[in-house]
Image (tube, coloured by chain):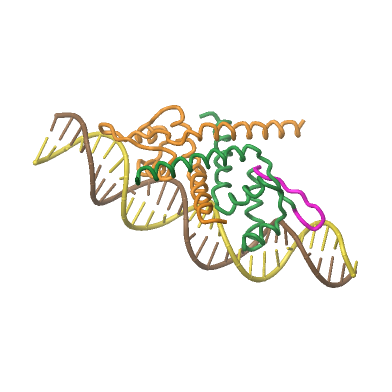
Chain colours: A green, B orange, C yellow, D brown
Amino acid sequence: MKAFEKKQQDEMSAIFKALAHPTRLWMVRELMRNERCVCEFVEASHLDFSTVSKHLSLLKQAHLIEDDKRGKNVYYRLRAVCLVSIVGCLEDHLKALQKERAEDRS
Amino acid sequence: MKAFEKKQQDEMSAIFKALAHPTRLWMVRELMRNERCVCEFVEASHLDFSTVSKHLSLLKQAHLIEDDKRGKNVYYRLRAVCLVSIVGCLEDHLKALQKERAEDRS
DNA sequence: ATTATTATTGGTTATATTGCCAAATGACAA
DNA sequence: TTGTCATTTGGCAATATAACCAATAATAAT
């Protein structure tokens, strides 16, 4: 494999790794609806501030979200628009699997 | 969050986790082209047979691929067709990022 | 039947990830 | 300046992951 292909593959698996944690996937899906500040995630998740901040920073490193300091707060929003279609695609896939399982049972 | 939503979210992050390892992502991309038997992956990756087998079994557990024993060999093939568009989507995203970086440098 | 081939499973060790706490930073407010 | 609020960073303990080797299973070939 050529070097730039390898690099792209590693970047892509870093993106998947960022989405691989339930909390981070939840965060991304929240940001698909609207921007949010860190404290809103803290409140909704009952996780420590530091934990939330680290999850967000990991998503940012993967270039999936971006941030923006306004007043006292740091606001995060979606950067990778393609996540919307990716999540939609996988939702359909999971629904199809569930339907298969339901039919197998009957 | 409702229970079935939570379950779906966990299943989805399991899918992302399965794709998060460079070797497994490579495997999926190979299977996007054609079915392959375990020994072909072993040969191409220079990894141990057991390592390859475990990676494949993880992808199978995530319902992304399926297998089929024929003769001496176990053949794996893609099950989740949506992976094709997902990978394509992310390739475009990464290319766009790279272009941005190139423009920032100039 | 015996042996060879292909793949999976179990066990171990090294490394990575996650979560919390405590401490540091940065911006606004008094 | 001093203090306060929102966030980030560093450090630590618990848990999860990945790689290899060895042992086992299943099937094909002799």
Q: Position of residue C22 (x, y in %)?
A: 67, 71
The quarter of the picture where the N terminus of chain B appears is: bottom right
Left or right? Give the position of B43 relative to A43: left
Tell which residue pokes out farthest to the front in this image.
A106
Q: Is residue B25 above or below residue D23?
A: above
Q: Position of residue A14 (x, y in %)?
A: 57, 43
Left or right? Give the position of B70 relative to A65: left
Residue A100 occupies which quadrant of the picture? top left
Q: Main secondary structure of the magenta part?
A: strand
Left or right? Give the position of A96 relative to B87: left
Which residue shows up at 40% across the image and 40% down it?
Answer: B47
Which residue shows up at 66% across the image and 60% down it?
Answer: A42
The quarter of the picture where the C terminus of chain B appears is: top right
Q: How many marks?
A: 0
Which residue shows up at 74% across the image and 51% down it?
Answer: A75
- The residue closer to the viewer here, B69 or D2, is B69
Q: Position of residue B66 (x, y in %)?
A: 38, 37
Left or right? Give the position of D25 relative to B97: left
Q: Position of residue B55 (x, y in %)?
A: 41, 43
First to last magenta residue range = A63-74
- The residue closer to the viewer here, B12 or D12, is B12
